[in-house]
Image (tube, rainbow, N blue to C red):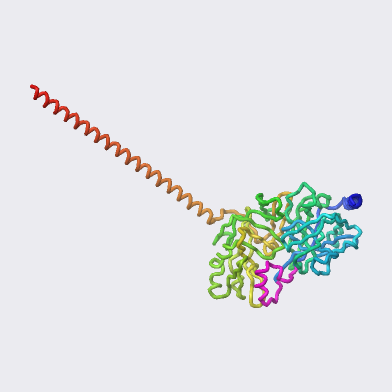
């Protein structure tokens, strides 16, 4: 058995060498088109909220998915894969398993002459649901027009818990901590392309170009960004992450409402921001969402236009149609030295003729933000493994922080320092008073002692004189 496996590996390696020779003059970057498609809203959020939303008579789709076409095998079998920045594996469903959802588009390994099964098991946890499968190696074709083919590792899923809807699988582009070691537990697609010398740099970019289309560039920064660096900002990857975490995450200084020049109603978080293309909502801390009841929806709630709904997991707002929803203050995220803005009209999704859903959800168990498509599709996003950074480029709704942002944290710090300094002053004053009182008491004691001694000496002198007179 080992000899057969070794033989297959040698054959695949020979094919790979031939591919490298055929593409030795390649430009060292890959460009793919992706689509953003509205699908069934059932996969938006977890089941407690789904059950509530299912009671609404939807006339418009709610869920958006960023999908790209990838082909596997010889001859090619093409799939629409979800672009997911929170996982790091490419996986599709196995046609020869009866334990996966009954969808028409599954990978048929028997029909591919280039397919190789490593027989190594693999488990996928979270994301679109848990799944199990095995690691495989196959010829991957990036796009119909590009015809770039290379052998990559991927997961052929043999058991899947939940229905994928219209998805055929996932193209995981999560952050890769393991940039130097190549093993079967961490096989980032970006790392594999770099190892096979099809790209120069371990980075990819996502740009929303039209109503439902976009472009993904792998390997190099587009000229649009290189030629206009003044509108390009970035934030470093959070160094405190676990090395088993594949999320693109950086420090979030604050989130505030209003114009970026006056910073009104600032709410400071000093939290984390996770950039996740598999989400089409924004998820934030519960306290922030609950505080919007007074800072954002106060008048609308009084008039019963909007209402705050809560359950075991989330807080969120549902609103009736009203033109004032388009004129609420914008929401701003401060990441590093940059502010990313999203307007109020972009924060609502019409889920029916009678309801609009506010797309910021509060989650009880988090102090972080998950930034999904409503924010990401506004900017040309850069996910850079080599620089350990997340970049964002745009000509509007992105601002450089020039003036310090007044925030509650600074006010709280000032109040604490004022209290400490006041306490120290009171303590010093009290100490001086005690010392003064002790000195005064000591001086009084000395005075009384001196008086007592003087009186004693006088008394002794008088007694001595009387004694002398008696003798005489």
The answer to whether 55 is drawn above or below residue 344 in the figure is below
Q: Quadrant of the C terminus?
A: top left
Asked whether the viewer can see residue 262, the reply is no
Asked whether the viewer can see residue 268, the reply is yes
Q: Residue furthest left?
A: 472
Residue 293: give x, y in percent of width and height.
55, 68
The answer to whether 265 is drawn above or below residue 319 in the figure is above
The answer to whether 36 is drawn above or below residue 174 in the figure is below
Q: Nearer the viewer, residue 439 or 118?
A: 118
Residue 207: give x, y in percent of width and height.
74, 61
The answer to whether 390 is drawn above or below residue 446 in the figure is below
Q: Nearer the viewer, residue 401 or 440?
A: 440
Specify whether 418 is left or right of 54: left
Residue 418: give x, y in percent of width and height.
46, 50
Region rendered in magenta? 37-61
Residue 55: give x, y in percent of width and height.
66, 76
């Amino acid at each position: 058995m080992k000899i057969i496996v070794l033989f297959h590996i040698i054959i695949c390696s020979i094919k790979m060498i031939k591919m490298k020779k055929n593409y030795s003059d390649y430009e060292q970057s890959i460009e793919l088109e992706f689509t953003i498609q509205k699908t069934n809203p059932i996969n938006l959020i977890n089941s407690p909220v789904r059950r509530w939303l299912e009671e609404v008579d939807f006339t418009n789709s709610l869920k958006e998915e960023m999908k790209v076409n990838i082909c596997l095998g010889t001859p090619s079998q093409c799939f629409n894969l979800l672009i997911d920045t929170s996982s790091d594996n490419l996986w599709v469903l196995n046609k020869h398993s009866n334990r996966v959802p009954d969808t028409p588009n599954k990978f048929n390994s028997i029909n591919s002459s280039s397919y190789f099964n490593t027989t190594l098991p693999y488990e996928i946890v979270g994301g679109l649901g848990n799944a199990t499968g095995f690691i495989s190696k196959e010829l991957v074709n990036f796009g119909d027009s590009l015809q770039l083919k290379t052998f990559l590792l991927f997961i052929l899923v043999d058991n899947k818990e939940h229905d994928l809807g219209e998805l055929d699988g996932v193209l995981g582009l999560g952050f890769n901590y393991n940039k130097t070691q190549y093993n079967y537990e961490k096989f980032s697609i970006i790392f594999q392309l770099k190892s096979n010398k099809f790209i120069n740099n371990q980075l990819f970019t996502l740009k929303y170009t039209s109503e439902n289309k976009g472009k993904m560039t792998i390997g190099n920064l587009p000229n649009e960004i290189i030629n206009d660096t003044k509108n390009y900002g970035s934030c470093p990857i959070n160094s405190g992450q676990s090395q088993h975490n594949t999320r693109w995450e950086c420090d979030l200084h604050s989130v505030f409402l209003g114009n970026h020049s006056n910073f009104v109603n600032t709410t400071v978080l000093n939290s984390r921001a996770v950039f996740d293309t598999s989400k089409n909502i924004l998820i934030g801390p519960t306290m922030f969402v609950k505080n919007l009841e007074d800072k954002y929806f106060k008048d609308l709630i009084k008039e019963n236009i909007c209402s705050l709904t809560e359950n075991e997991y989330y807080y969120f707002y549902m609103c009736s149609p009203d033109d004032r929803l388009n004129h609420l203050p914008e929401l701003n995220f401060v990441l590093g030295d940059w502010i990313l803005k999203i307007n109020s009209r972009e924060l609502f999704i019409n889920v029916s003729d009678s309801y609009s859903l506010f797309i910021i959800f509060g989650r009880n168990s988090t102090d972080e933000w998950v930034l999904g498509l409503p924010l990401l599709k506004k900017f040309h996003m850069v996910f850079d493994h080599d620089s350990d950074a997340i970049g964002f480029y745009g000509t509007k709704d992105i601002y450089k922080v020039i003036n310090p942002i007044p925030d509650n944290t600074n006010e709280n710090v000032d109040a604490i320092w004022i209290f400490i300094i006041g306490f120290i002053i009171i303590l010093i004053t009290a100490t001086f008073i005690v010392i003064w009182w002790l000195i005064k008491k000591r001086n009084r004691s000395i005075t009384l002692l001196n008086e007592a001694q003087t009186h004693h000496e006088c008394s002794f002198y008088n007694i001595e004189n009387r004694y002398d007179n008696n003798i005489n």
